[in-house]
Image: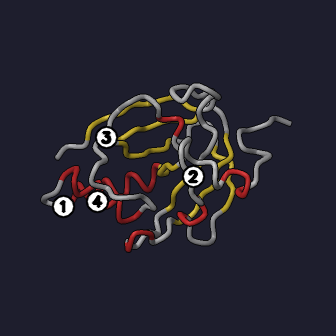
C-alpha cells in the first residue's frame, strides 16, 4: 500500500507547527466540520502572497480551484475594483489576516496524492468566512522551502489594481 504525505498524522500533530518563529492554533481557522481528505494528482491549489519569492511550498493555507474561481469570477463581474476587490473578497471569505498587502497569486498542482485538511473558514477578524480552505502542512521538501516532491509550481501573477 502506498504511503502519502501526512497520511499517518492527525490534525493535533500538525495544528501548531505552522511557522518557523511563532506558532498559532490552526484549528481556530476552521469552522466545524472539517475533515482529512486525500487530494489526488492534478489538484490545483491557490494562495495570495505579498511578493513572488519562490518559497511557496512552505505555506500551509491554500484555496481549492473552485473557491478561487468563484471569488475571481465575482470580482470580474463587478464594474470596478479589479485586483483590490478580488483581494478583499478573499480576505472576507478566508481565515486570513489583513488583505491589504497581498499582491500576487500562486498556483500549484499536485504531482502526487497528499493528505490535507479541508473545511469552511472561520469568521475571524470580524469577517464572515465560510469558504472551503485547505490546510496542507509538510508540502516543502525538508530543508528546501522552494521545492516539493509532491507539487509543482504552475504559475504566479500579479493582481491588476
Residue at which label 2 appears: 23
The image quarter containing residue 97 is bottom left
Q: Which of these two is toward me, 87 or 79?
A: 87
The 10 Å Cα crowd at callout 1, few under 14, some 14 to 19, many 20 or more, is: few
Residue 78, numbered circle: 1
Precedes in sequence: disc 3 or disc 1 = 1
Residue mark closest to the camera, 4 vs 1:
4
Q: Which of these two is toward me, 73 or 62?
A: 62
Q: CA distance from mark 4 to mark 3?
A: 13 Å
Q: Quadrant of the N terminus?
A: top right
Q: CA distance from mark 4 to mark 1?
A: 13 Å
Helix, strand or loop for disc 1: loop
Residue at which label 3 appears: 104
Residue mark closest to the camera, 2 vs 1:
2
**In the image, is 34 to the left or to the right of 108?**
right
The 10 Å Cα crowd at callout 4, few under 14, some 14 to 19, many 20 or more, is: some
Residue at which label 4 appears: 88
The residue located at (79%, 36%) in the rendering is 3
Precedes in sequence: disc 2 or disc 1 = 2
Amino acid at each position: 500500500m502506498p504511503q502519502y504525505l501526512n497520511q499517518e498524522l492527525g490534525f493535533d500533530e500538525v495544528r501548531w507547527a505552522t511557522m518557523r518563529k511563532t506558532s498559532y492554533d490552526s484549528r481556530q481557522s476552521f469552522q466545524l466540520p472539517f475533515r482529512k481528505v486525500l487530494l489526488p494528482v492534478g489538484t490545483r491549489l491557490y494562495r495570495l502572497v505579498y511578493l513572488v519569492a519562490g518559497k511557496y511550498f512552505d505555506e500551509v493555507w491554500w484555496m481549492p480551484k473552485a473557491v478561487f474561481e468563484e471569488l475571481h469570477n465575482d470580482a470580474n463581474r463587478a464594474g470596478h475594483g479589479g485586483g483590490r476587490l478580488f483581494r478583499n473578497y478573499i480576505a472576507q471569505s478566508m481565515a486570513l489576516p489583513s488583505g491589504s498587502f497581498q499582491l500576487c497569486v500562486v498556483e500549484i498542482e499536485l504531482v502526487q496524492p497528499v493528505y490535507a485538511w479541508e473545511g469552511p473558514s472561520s469568521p475571524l477578524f470580524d469577517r464572515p468566512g465560510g469558504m472551503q480552505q485547505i490546510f496542507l502542512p509538510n508540502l516543502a521538501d525538508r530543508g528546501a522551502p522552494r521545492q516539493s516532491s509532491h507539487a509543482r509550481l504552475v504559475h504566479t501573477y500579479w493582481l491588476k489594481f
